[in-house]
Image (cartoon, rainbow, N blue to C red):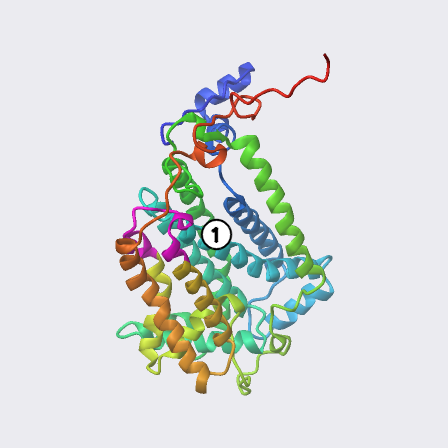
């Protein structure tokens, strides 16, 4: 796949002159037109395109909102109200941006599940996968910073709680906390810092996404069987086969996105964020956005403050070790019956942690969170290594083509199996 060369041939003299000096058209053609992809890709492989579309949407709406936002403790809340009430289509831009963060995480969690289910993290795609984990970390940081900007009650107290736990880090914790606060407590300097970082990080994400796509085109795409490409018969051109699927899936996803914008714009938020920040009044129950709830549950499951911080960050960083913790030679969970059951259990535990993160940290909720946290780490440290050693996989097809057509069959140019009998004529 890395040896795939461009088949683009410029026609006009201007195009030839330009291509000989900056072959960007040929690069785009070889990467997104003639690029060979496995012919058995399913709709799980469309979420890369969906995520790219969502990233562009977030950057464009974010730039527009920044033109009207005031990053001060005195003016932030009112500037958001100004955007909602006075700026032309400001309500639409803000709802697109706020709900777009949630839709971004919906798509990225499905994308991550696909990687874990089909073994897309295994050799030779380790760097590709690690770049994906870096993008996820940057997304989490960007989303947290953005959540604080409306400067409502939940924004203020969420910023206070999360930045306070950084003080538990030995040696450097207090320094990091002071740098983020810009003083001795959360206030205007903090908000100014958070706004600057929130504006910067999406462009960092875009840069890592470019590296992610580059690494993908070097190693080639994984597929539902996990079998490497063995011949040209295993592939189809990216355009139109994958392009049409990506466009259709993106349209469906954006229709889902539109439902939240126009019918449930505040459902995924918190009502307390429509109350101006008040340092003297603590909300009864401080919760982050839904996509942080599993990690928030892990943080609260440990009675020791430093231990909770370590486990919370470890829960994300351990994802990057999956290529080396999984000892199975088989990529796809379709052919790993035991691992597939454990993986669905892992997904159930993540959902349970999300629920527990929204509950008060008391009684049975804390005990359940500790049990779920224990399994979360056990999945990576015990299940992946041991199941890979002792599991007997199911029989696999001989090639990607066999997984589509069945053993011994081939596609003709018309898409019909070669050697298929012609239909009998109705004429005598």
Q: In which quarter of the image is the C terminus?
A: top right
- Describe residue 76's horizontal placement relative to residue 212 as left or right: right
Q: Residue 49 versus residue 188: which sits nearer the camera?
A: 49
User: Would you say residue 327 sits in the magenta stretch?
Assistant: yes
Q: Please, what secondary structure does the residue beneath circle 1 have?
A: helix
- Describe residue 252's horizontal placement relative to residue 234 as left or right: right
- The majority secondary structure of the magenta stretch comes to helix
Question: In the image, residue 92 lies at what x, y percent?
Answer: 69, 58
**As drawn, 82 above or below 369:** above
Residue 151 in sight in this render: yes
Q: Which residues, given as a range, are shown in magenta?
A: 320-340
Q: Residue 71 versus residue 109: which sits nearer the camera?
A: 109
Residue 187 in sight in this render: no
Residues packed near mark 1 inside 10 Å, few (<14), some (14 to 19) or many (20 plus): many
Question: In the image, residue 269 lies at what x, y percent?
Answer: 60, 70
Q: Which residue position is annotated with label 1?
A: 111
User: Would you say residue 361 sits in the magenta stretch?
Assistant: no
Tally of numbered discs: 1
């Amino acid at each position: 796949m890395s040896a795939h060369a461009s088949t683009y041939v410029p026609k006009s003299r201007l195009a030839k002159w330009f291509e000989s000096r900056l072959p960007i058209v040929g690069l785009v053609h070889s990467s997104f037109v003639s690029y060979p992809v496995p012919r058995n890709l399913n709709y799980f492989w469309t979420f890369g395109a969906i995520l790219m579309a969502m990233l562009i949407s977030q950057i464009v709406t974010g730039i527009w909102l920044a033109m009207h936002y005031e990053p001060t403790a005195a003016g932030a809340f009112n500037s958001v109200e100004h955007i909602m009430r006075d700026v032309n289509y400001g309500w639409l831009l803000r709802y697109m941006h706020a709900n777009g963060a949630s839709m971004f995480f919906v798509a990225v969690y499905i994308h991550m599940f696909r990687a874990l289910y089909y073994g897309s993290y295994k050799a030779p795609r380790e760097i590709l996968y690690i770049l994906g984990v870096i993008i996820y970390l940057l997304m989490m940081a960007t989303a947290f910073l953005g959540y604080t900007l409306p400067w409502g009650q939940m924004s203020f107290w969420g910023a206070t709680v999360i930045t306070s736990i950084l003080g538990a880090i030995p040696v450097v914790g207090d320094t990091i906390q002071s740098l983020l606060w810009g003083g001795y407590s959360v206030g205007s300097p903090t908000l100014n810092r958070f706004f600057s970082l929130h504006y910067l990080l999406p462009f960092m994400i875009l840069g890592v996404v470019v590296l992610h796509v580059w690494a993908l085109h070097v190693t080639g795409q994984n597929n539902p069987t996990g079998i490497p490409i063995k011949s040209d018969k295993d592939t189809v051109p990216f355009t139109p086969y994958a392009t049409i699927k990506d466009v259709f899936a993106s349209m469906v996803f954006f229709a889902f996105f539109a439902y939240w914008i126009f019918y449930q714009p505040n459902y995924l938020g918190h009502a307390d964020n429509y109350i101006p920040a008040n340092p003297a009044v603590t909300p009864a129950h401080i919760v982050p956005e839904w996509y942080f709830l599993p990690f928030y549950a892990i943080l609260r499951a440990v009675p020791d403050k430093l231990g909770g911080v370590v486990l919370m960050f470890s829960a994300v960083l351990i994802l990057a070790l999956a290529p080396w913790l999984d000892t199975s030679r088989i990529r796809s969970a379709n052919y790993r019956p035991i691992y597939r059951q454990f993986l669905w259990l892992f997904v159930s535990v993540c959902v349970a942690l999300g629920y527990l993160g929204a509950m008060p940290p008391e009684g049975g909720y804390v005990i359940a969170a500790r049990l779920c946290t224990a399994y979360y780490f056990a999945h990576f440290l015990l299940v992946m290594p041991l199941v890979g050693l002792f599991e007997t996989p199911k029989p696999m097809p001989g090639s990607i083509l066999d997984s589509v057509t069945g053993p011994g069959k081939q596609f003709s140019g018309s898409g019909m199996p070669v050697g298929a009998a012609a239909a009998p004529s109705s004429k005598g």
